[in-house]
Image (spheres, coloured by chain):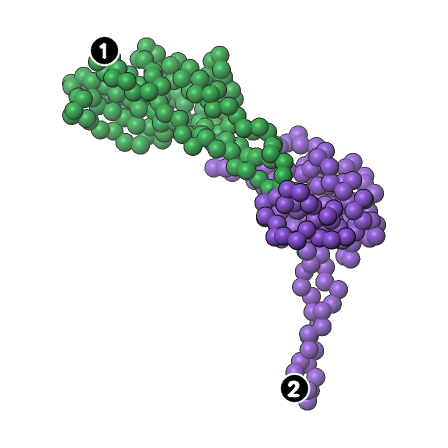
Chain colours: A purple, B green
Amino acid sequence: MALPNKVLAGFTASLYIQPTASPTALTLTQLSTLASVSAIAVSGNLLNVEAIPAFGQDDAVASFGVAGSRQSDKVPTQSAPTSLTITAPWNPSDANLLLIRGDAYSGIIDRTFVIAATDGTNIVYYAFNARVSEFKIDAQPSAEAKAVFTVHPRGNLYGWSNNA
Amino acid sequence: MTTQNNITQYAQAIQEQLAGIFSPVPVYALFNRNFATQPKFVTWQLRNVHQPVYTGNYQGNKGIDRPIFQVSIFTSNLQTGMADGFNLANTLIQSLHGYSGSFGTTHAFQVAKADVSMLYHGYDDAVDLFHVFLDVTLDISA
């Protein structure tokens, strides 16, 4: 499947979460399957957030130095998907925000998250399974109240797909 | 989170709320030579109506609106004009600074907080009017 051949604008990324309090997270194969991922990326599953932070993979290398060898070596290892600290405008009765709050309260719920980046026509999906920690409300008076939470993807459980 | 609020409703509610606060001193939306007949009067101007826009292709993903309106108090009496102006400014501050609840009357909406800031006062020799200017910031939940 061909990817859209253009640079995407940064502000048109949306975050979707799998519904219900006890979701069945997608399998590794499904995370790269458009039909499985796009089924989650529907308006009812939208999580209204201010901005999507950098997503993808963390850096992880093993460094080697061998006595007598001129150069050392850096070997990439199985680097984990990047954790995302996300800020959302706090709507206390937003159903999807309450799911995030419940996940953080539990700490052991695996849920599939989908980031959809679009240029207005085509969509690139990044899907991953993750648990939520650190759910807190920032209600300082000089700005609107924020809900801040961190999403930690599980190791080796993410995939890319697109609808182009 | 929501659609953009209607600026017309802001304007109507501001006029209603200020008219209630300053009564019997008249409140006008624009300055139009009212000093010819009014020894004391108040005008206001609305600005900075803007809800922040957030990520994604959903138009409803926006934050709260924090519009600002300037209140201009004019008084004409040479002996008591400055005191009259400051007293009207105090009336506004006592009524609105830190206020939360219903704002306006027939076109009312809820404000989470109102913040009044007195900017400066002065005297215009050309029109023979004392004036006091204040900014009011409204936090309007989306």
- Residue A142, image x and y in percent? 47, 37
- Give A156 or B91, whichever is nearer the viewer: A156
How would you rate the neighbour count of disc 1 (Cα within 10 Å): few for under 14, some for 14-19, many for 20 or more? few
Specify whether B27 is left or right of A61: left
The chain letter under disc 1 is B
Q: Residue at x 53, y 32 (%)?
A: B64
Specify whether A69 is left or right of B94: right
Q: Quadrant of the N terminus of chain B?
A: top right
Specify whether B107 is left or right of A36: left
Q: Residue at x 49, y 15 (%)?
A: B107
- Residue B6 vertical placement versus A45 (above, below): above
Q: Which residue is mark 2?
A: A70
- Residue A112, image x and y in percent? 76, 45
Residue A105 visible at all: no
Which of the 4 image quarters holds residue B119? top left
Spatial CA distance of label 1 from label 2 is 93 Å
- Residue A88, image x and y in percent? 61, 40
How would you rate the neighbour count of disc 2 (Cα within 10 Å): few for under 14, some for 14-19, many for 20 or more? few
Q: Which residue is mark 1?
A: B37
Q: Are marks 1 and 2 in contact (CB under 8 Å)?
A: no
The amino acid type, in three-letter code, at marker 2 is Arg
Residue B108 visible at all: yes
Q: Residue at x 68, y 51 (%)?
A: A4
Helix, strand or loop for disc 2: loop
Query: Can you tell which mark lies on residue A87?
Result: none
The amino acid type, in three-letter code, at marker 1 is Thr
